[in-house]
Image (cartoon, helix red, strand yellow):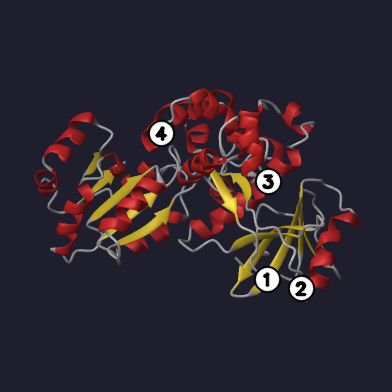
Amino acid sequence: MVQRIAKAKLKDLASKFKCVALTGARQAGKTTLVKEVFSSKPYVSLENPDIRRFALEDPRGFLQTYPEGAVLDEVQRVPELFSYIQEVLDNSSKKGLFILTGSNNFLLQQNISQTLAGRVGYLNLLPFSIAELNKAKLLPASDDELMIKGFYPPIYDQEIPPSDWCPNYIRTYIERDVRQIKNISDLIVFERFVKLLAGRTGQELNNSALSVETGVDVKTIQSWIGILESSFIIYLLKPHHQNFNKTIVKRPKVYFYDTAIVCSLLGIQNLLQLETHPLRGAIFETMVVMEFVKLRTNKGLPVNLYFWRDKTGHEIDLIIDEAGELFPIEIKSGKTINTEFFRNLDYWKKLSGFENSFLLYAGIQKQHRSNGTVVSNWRSLMDFPI
């Protein structure tokens, strides 16, 4: 079993709160983790039709079946249960009584905010991180292989080729989860929209352009973006709020949580196709940015990551905001250092007055230059204050 970094935070939350909610994408390993950490608790899946019917028809009787608490998996399937869970929690002083899991952040968070606010510790579980794969000795040797394989557990523990697993995952997500979240009548148009979005990973999110290409209105695009974000398919990286020259862009950048999904949506099935693909750099950037997100998320910390771009085209791929101290990071998929790599970092440093900067690239040379630290072993991410 791959040991999850989030395990420590999950135990910590269960020692402090009466209830803990663990959310994340389908197949990210939530069930495996809660069964391991809370092995003494009954495990109840609300995907089971018979159990779900019992919970719907007699929620109080259902909860009384588990006087010492339980792990309730996919609890968003029975939103009526939350008010009754609140009643049980208010009448108990026991910590970690109920462990709730769900694969849709919006539905679960909406119900928690309405009924269980202040009673629940909240944690997101993302697919494997590089550190987790490395510790388990499952980490692919090359960056390209890692991008194609991605980070979802079934590709590693069940040894399912990503070319087989990803299309089925996407199809299941679109046909099942999207209908559960919102009744989208034309799934073919939605699927085309997701593919168009994959071609924009690492780019600014332009809803108007997507609206034109997809053939639906902007409000629908915004709604669909919300669905993908709450389901942990895409991540929106916000622009940094500090205006140094008053001409920064205000739209977020869109990233997919997993590069294997991006490759599948783009039709990339092997290393040769990836090596020559025009979006290889954007896919590499996606992988790196999501590793930074996992570092924070696995510790249960708010994500302190942003990007910066002005309207003349100068851009910093990633900015870590550590209590007001800013650390700009330029991400390059190339293996040879080029002085051009430092151009945007130099511009931003002159503009902002901050001194620290990092160039993170796929090569093997580590350097401390006057205009920034060159990070070679980017997979460790140990040089960053995060």
Name the residue type under label 4. Asp
Q: Is residue 177 visible?
A: yes
Q: Which mark is residue 200?
A: none
Nearest-to-viewer mark from 1 and 4: 4
Local packing at callout 4 (Cα closer than 10 Å; few below 14, some 14-19, many 20+) is some
| Callout 4: SS | helix
| CA separation in Å, label 1 and label 3 | 21 Å
Local packing at callout 2 (Cα closer than 10 Å; few below 14, some 14-19, many 20+) is few
| Callout 1: SS | strand
* Marked residue nearer the N-terminal end (1 or 3): 3
| CA separation in Å, label 2 and label 3 | 23 Å
Q: Which residue is mark 1?
A: 326
Instruction: Give the residue at x 56% y 32%.
Output: 216
| Callout 2: SS | helix
Dots 1, 4 in contact, CB < 8 A: no
Is 81 on the left or on the right of 239, as rendered? left
Q: Is residue 73 visible?
A: no
Is 143 on the left or on the right of 20, as rendered? right
* Marked residue nearer the N-terminal end (4 or 2): 4
Name the residue type under label 2. Ser
Q: Which residue is mark 2?
A: 352
Dots 1, 2 in contact, CB < 8 A: yes
Residue 32, position in %: x, y? Answer: 37, 42
Q: Which mark is residue 202?
A: 3
Residue that lies at the very extreme toward the front in this rendered image: 217
Q: Which residue is mark 4?
A: 177
* In this view, 270 is above or below 234: above
Local packing at callout 3 (Cα closer than 10 Å; few below 14, some 14-19, many 20+) is many
Instruction: Give the residue at x 48% y 61%.
Output: 299
Name the residue type under label 1. Leu
* In this view, 312 is above or below 72: below
